Image: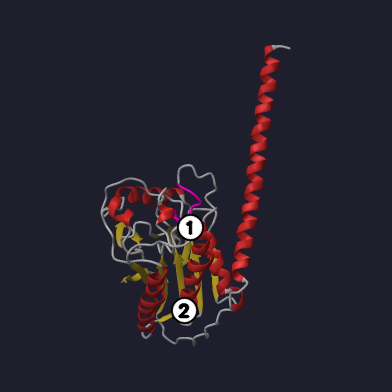
Amino acid sequence: MKKEDFQEMAEVERLRRELDRANKVVHEMAGLHDVVRDVILSALRDVQPPVVPKLPPVSKKKRKEIAVIHLSDWQIGALTDTYDLTVAREMILGQLLDVVTKLIRERQMVCDVNECVVLLGGDMVDGSALRPTQAWEVESTVYTQAVHDCPRLMADFVLGITGMFRKVRVECVRGNHGRNGAMKGNWNPASVNWDSVAYETAKHMVKPEQLDGRITWHNEVETFYRMVPVGKHSIFLTHGDVFRGSGGFAGIPVYSIVKKMARWVDSIPDPWAVLMMGHYHNPTSLTVGSRTCYINGTTKRGGEWELEELAMSTRPAQRLQFWDENHGVKSDHVIWL
């Protein structure tokens, strides 16, 4: 045989091995999706049907506004000296829900606010494999975080505010804490994320299909962002871990954010005027020309990693806004917890 023949045979063998590996990955991914589906279904068997909030009367107020609630970075499952599931539940379903309800009720006295957009911005679960030591810094497994604790909180919050509106839209994007492994060396597709599992489980707990279209729920799993229409405007919703660089202000890479905002205007065909993100745990807003970036806070308190790496631990906070259909953001409320 000629030398070329041996080379061709070796190449054929190499390609055969590559094909076998690819088929194995496809088979494993198919099995993973089956496992996730079975896990969600098993967790929901004992879940009681939700209490359907009554539909509020039609408002006669002429001025119309839309409420936008940004929830992110709950990191359910995280354990510090001052934060665990019990603290998170009291903070979210106690303090946060109470303040949000009061602010919305006050607004409804002067405006017709019959629609709400709930933005679930990622890192709702803490995960357990983001860094080598994280498994020793959580109070529950990622299964418990994503299938039991976190979705129950999200579902209860959504149902808790639904009684004030005739229409509720829930929009979800994944965060980095939900990744199934560290950023480097993680061979799973980006769509394999425990935040997405928590969102889907919460959706089944809420059962929007039983509310005659009153609640709609979109869980974005294919891309890192979601364009959310609000009136005649759109929100560019993303978690925030796509920005690189250090420095900036209070741990926020301002230059990277400004640069990508300018580039996204041309590279993403959908028009948008507001960028909503979390990730940095520090409630901040910055305006670039005619566009504004709103950075959300977190409910997490304390944490060894935050103190060691960032030298900071911010006060817990989330965000509520009121939008005019034509003019966009009318008021912005940082709710300190």
In the rendered image, residue 149, in percent from the top left (x then y), is placed at 49, 68
The answer to whether 103 is drawn above or below residue 280 in the figure is below
In the rendered image, residue 155, in percent from the top left (x then y), is placed at 50, 72
Q: Quadrant of residue 7?
A: top right
Residue corresponding to mark 2: 160
State the scheme by which the image is colored: secondary structure
Name the N-terminal-most of marks 2 and 1.
2
User: Which type of secondary structure does the marked residue at label 1 adopt?
Assistant: loop
Name the residue furthest front: 136
Does residue 322 show up? no
Name the residue located 55 percent from the left edge and 48 percent from the top edge: 189
Name the residue located 48 percent from the left edge and 42 percent from the top edge: 185
The amino acid type, in three-letter code, at marker 1 is: Arg
Magenta part of the chain? 175-182
In the rendered image, residue 258, in percent from the top left (x then y), is placed at 33, 51
Does residue 34 show up? yes
User: Is 88 included in the stretch rendered in magenta?
Assistant: no
For the residues labelled 2 and 1, the Cα–Cα distance comes to 23 Å
- Residue 142 in the figure: left or right of residue 107: right
The amino acid type, in three-letter code, at marker 2 is: Gly
Q: Quadrant of residue 121?
A: bottom left
Residue corresponding to mark 1: 174
Q: Quadrant of residue 96?
A: bottom left
| Residue nearest the observer in this picture, 307 or 318 | 307
User: Which type of secondary structure does the marked residue at label 2 adopt?
Assistant: helix
Name the residue located 27 percent from the left edge and 47 percent from the top edge: 247
- Checking the image for residue 227, the label placed there is none
Q: Quadrant of the N terminus?
A: top right
